[in-house]
Image (cartoon, helix red, strand yellow):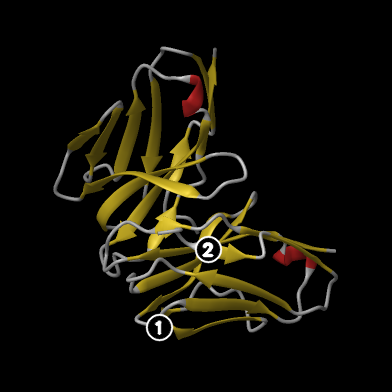
Amino acid sequence: SQQGEEDPQALSIQEGENATMNCSYKTSINNLQWYRQNSGRGLVHLILIRSNEREKHSGRLRVTLDTSKKSSSLLITASRAADTASYFCAAALLQGAQKLVFGQGTRLTINP
Amino acid sequence: DAGVIQSPRHEVTEMGQEVTLRCKPISGHDYLFWYRQTMMRGLELLIYFNNNVPIDDSGMPEDRFSAKMPNASFSTLKIQPSEPRDSAVYFCASSYRVGEPYFGPGTRLTVT
């Protein structure tokens, strides 16, 4: 079964608002990664947070990780129409960090 | 670099036919991954290679699926015989050591 579960499955907000997506996983991880997928395209790596980190920033992205709860969140601030995409978390397993297990994804729609 | 190259981009075939998907990883990358994406199961890791050697093929659904990496610049995923339930988007990705994987654009397979 999938390691990662994400919520919400779909999120629709107005441009300029912040978007928060959550991810939960089941076993110990080496790191957790977030990806974006535009419709019909491949996945683009956004950010990686290691298991010993609690928070990480990259531009308008903020990721948190709570290993005690086995959960992570991705916050996109000041959303733009171009942020419309599906967002996936991926858990890199502790044993075999090359092996990513993806969540089902959150479909984010930014309304102009 | 052109990124990960996959061919064909779209494949439509009849049940029972052999299908071969191809991937050219980014030059210098030593890991290569094959993923499958469906609405029902999301993104699943099928198999990955390190230095052309298959490391983990536990995600390969059944004996109808096989993957090879004859050299560092080429890999194939073969389905023989194909079935309608194999319809999906198949992604190839490559990475250097345990770095972030770079995904190709995917091959959309439809088996009728």
Q: Please tell me which residue lies in front, A46 or A68.
A: A46
Check whether the beta carbons of the residues at disc 1 and disc 2 lie within 8 A of each other: no
Callout 1: chain: B
Q: Is A60 situated left or right of B105 in this image? A: left
Residue at x 57%, y 78% (from the top left corner): B76
The disc at residue B5 is: 2
Location of residue A50 in the rendering, given as x and y in whole percent from the top left corner: 20, 50
Of marks 1 and 2, which one's residue comes earlier in the chain? 2
Quadrant of residue A36 in the image?
Answer: top left
- Residue B13 is left or right of residue A69, and the answer is right
Does residue A83 sit above or below A26 in this rendering?
above
Residue pointed to by mark 1: B52
Q: Identity of the amino acid at label 2? A: Ile
Count of number-bearing discs:
2
Choose mark 1 or mark 2, whichever is in front: 2
Residue A72 falls in which quadrant of the image?
A: top left
Residue B31 lies, in percent from the top left, at: 36, 72
Disc 1: CA contacts within 10 A as few (<14), some (14-19) or many (>=20):
some
- Residue A107: x and y in percent read 54, 33
Which residue extends farthest left? A52
